[in-house]
Image: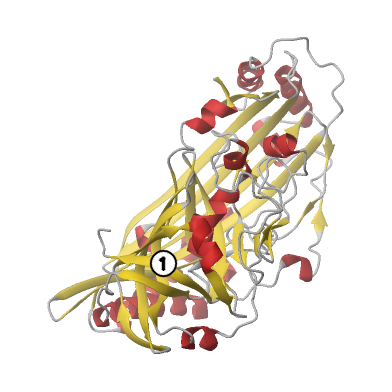
Amino acid sequence: MSTTRRRFLETAAWGTAILTFPEILSGCGETLVVRPANLGPTPPRRVAPVGPSYFAAFGVDRALVSRVIARGMSRGGDFCEVFLQHKVSHWIGMEDGEVNRAYAEVMLGAGVRVLKGDATGYAFCEDLSEKALLAAASTAAAVADGPARADLPPLQVAAIPDRYRIAVPWTDIGIDKKLPIVQRAEAQAKARDSHIVKVKASIDDESTRVLVADSEGRLVEDDQPMTVLGVSCVAEKDGRTESSGQSLAARDGVSFHSQERVDKVAHEAADFTMLLFEASPPPPGEYPVVLAPGLSGILLHEAIGHGMEADFNRKGISIYSDRVGKRIAGDMVTIVDDGTNERMRGSINIDDEGAEAQRTVLVEKGILRSYMHDRISAGHYKVGRTGSGRRESYRFPPVPRMRNTYMLNGPHKAGEIIASVKKGIYAEMFSNGEVHIGAGDFTFYLKHGRMIEDGKLTRRVKDANLIGNGPKVLENIDMVADDMQMHSGAGYCGKDGQRIPVGFGLPTARANAISVGGRKS
């Protein structure tokens, strides 16, 4: 298939961007304090072997990749990129004390992209034979109509960071090592409270290998692990039923699932469920909202972050399209999108265009400094790429996407912020959010929180929608604490029909006015 990038984006850009947590994983993940990556040690760098790559096992060597790129450039394209992916994933689930589902999934394929001016040609295949790869390249090349490029440089293997290497690949971990983790999580949650009547627990893992090579001579390979432990509970008490859950995710190996972590996830899943019996919906109205550290970063991701992805700005869709260098928040607000935090869910060594991941300062002391750029938007704005070109799989071309998005610490204390509110809401746990990119209007479902009355946390609240406008809320953040935490549960971000893993975080922060409505608002 061949299509312009404009047409590709227009099919989704006027809709919504959505952040979701799968049912089994809904709830707040374990929170971790994360230092800005550029303040920590520089991760070691590794270079793919000079000999055959991982994909040589599938009959793809460097010479074949070079021929595919040459075919992609055969009609005068400006740029050609080949993306190879092999992904092996496993999932084991328990319910009511029994393993009720287990599966494995394998994905293998290649995507070829050719750029010519503002137009994009893209094709993919799930057969890595030379015939299929060259056919895909020919299809993508049709976006151009000119003489072949004969001056292509030879492919050179590039060094990349090493942020999430694991000792034993997930493909070498048998079910005998995974099943006890799920069994322990299920048993710990069930035993936590006598009112827990149903528990679902699951563990999933991914081993993904990617190769990116392009007509500028760059070739990189990366090995990207991922694992998620999820527990959800249903409880019955006094004729009522409540449900909640907990999850924990990382780019890590089986050793990540220590007994301590497993027990913590299970206990919190049960505790969050039981707390809901004490909660009731808050009164509707417009209140100051204090965002708890960690999971409340969903608001930062959804209501603000998408508007800073460069494709929306290049097309004039985002409200931030003409705001670079201008004030959009108070001087205590600094926001980064970071692919360099070691082992975090949204971290990457390279993006899906082969560019090295970076720590990108989006907002610095209230001033919008940068968008998140892929190759196309960086060329349009004549700036460097930020390592933000991401795709769900080889079936999609890359677009600018978030990685780990969070706000840096501010000058206040959490207790000071809560004490400053006469009447408001302390928002602790969200499940799902939605934003309309153009105007920045959002809705978030508040799963769990507390009322703030006379500067103190009082009764528990639940089942409310926070409704507002992202840019206005950002302007209204007037207090930021020094307790930044990262949410480390299993969040997925949807955009342009693509679903990718992301991370986010926030210190305690006060927005002085957000509308609060009921479940159906």
Residue 169 point in image, percent of width and height:
62, 57
Decide if residue 376 is in sight here. yes
**Crowding near pointer 1: few (<14 within 10 Å), some, many (20+)?**
many
On screen, 439 above or below 95?
above
Position of the N terminus by quadrant: top right
Dot 1 lies on which element? strand
Relative to residue 415, is residue 136 drawn left or right?
A: right
Q: Nearer the viewer, residue 448 or 97?
A: 448
Residue 420 point in image, percent of width and height:
49, 85
Relative to residue 72, is residue 465 drawn left or right?
A: left
Position of the C terminus by quadrant: bottom left
Decide if residue 40 is in sight here. no
Q: Nearer the viewer, residue 174 or 185?
A: 185
Residue 192 point in image, percent of width and height:
33, 83
Residue 74 point in image, percent of width and height:
74, 14
Q: Which residue is mark 1?
A: 514
Q: Nearer the viewer, residue 357 or 219?
A: 357
Describe the colour scheme in one phrase: secondary structure
Indicate the quadrant where residue 127 lies.
Answer: top right
For image coordinates 51% across by 81% down, the residue present is: 260
For image coordinates 68% across by 50% down, the residue present is: 324
Indicate the quadrant where residue 376 lies.
Answer: top right
The single residue placed furthest to the left in the displayed view is: 239
For image coordinates 48% across by 54% down, the residue present is: 492
Looking at the rendered structure, the number of numbered marks drawn on it comes to: 1
On screen, 479 above or below 343?
below
Residue type at mark 1: give it. Answer: Ile
